[in-house]
Amino acid sequence: KNEVEQSPQNLTAQEGEFITINCSYSVGISALHWLQQHPGGGIVSLFMLSSGKKKHGRLIATINIQEKHSSLHITASHPRDSAVYICAVRGGETSGSRLTFGEGTQLTVNP
Amino acid sequence: DTEVTQTPKHLVMGMTNKKSLKCEQHMGHRAMYWYKQKAKKPPELMFVYSYEKLSINESVPSRFSPECPNSSLLNLHLHALQPEDSALYLCASSQVPGARETQYFGPGTRLLVL
């Protein structure tokens, strides 16, 4: 079992739909990151969370530390949101700078 | 300037070649990272430099040799690579090394080893 599991692996939506991507982890963490990777490779850091909820534009990220679970929501999805979304966690201070990555969720938003 | 730049964007090399990948950031970050990413897989950490010193080497083969000449620059020297080393190589930086720091990623260098 991977330390970080994402679901779904693939997600296809119609423009305008509300999207949820889930991330569960099995280790104690100090921070959880949501990353976006477009075709061609570049990775953008969307959020870093250690508790609660963050919002940026149409993106919302939540984390429940007790349940070891985080969700990334996209409201009013758009074809330009099509990308791979990666959840990554960082353990405590003794884990250094290592991020443990999930396998990613491939999102396709059709017009 | 919140950008991490990487050159070249693409690189094709033979197994006997020597080449270098370059990564640069001017955000004053003191931690820099090399990752390797195969198709449809998440990035795998290779090296971490902390205050220009190598702090993490994830058992990477010696045909990959990192170098941090100064706090803004990170190189990855490649020699005698194998075809299975073909991948996207990503550089990242963070303000300091540590659990709660956001990593800023570069666009990557797509490497093909023939």
Image (cartoon, coloured by chain):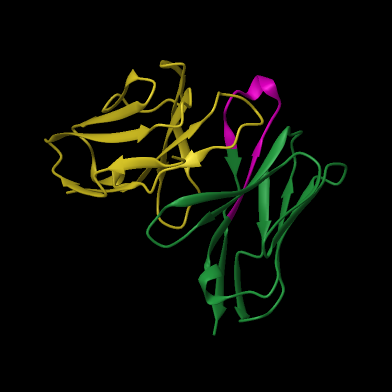
Chain colours: A green, B yellow
Q: Which residues are magenta?
A: A86-99
Q: Position of residue A37 (x, y in %)?
A: 49, 56
- A23 magenta-colored: no
Q: Residue A84 placed where, x, y %?
A: 53, 61
Above/below status of A20 relative to B54: below
Q: Position of residue A75 (x, y in %)?
A: 70, 70
x, y percentage for residue A29? Answer: 73, 34
Camera sees residue A1: no
Rendered position, B88 above or below B45? below
Q: Is residue A9 above or below residue A63?
A: below
Residue beneath the point at 72% across and 74% down = A18
Q: Indicate the quadrant containing the C terminus of chain A: top left, top right, bottom left or bottom right.
A: bottom right
Q: Is residue A87 magenta?
A: yes
Residue drawn where x is 35% and y is 41% of the image: B5
- The residue drawn where x is 57% and y is 69% is A107
Q: Nearer the viewer, residue A79 or B43?
A: A79
Q: Residue furthest front?
A: B1
Q: Nearer the viewer, residue B73 or A89?
A: B73
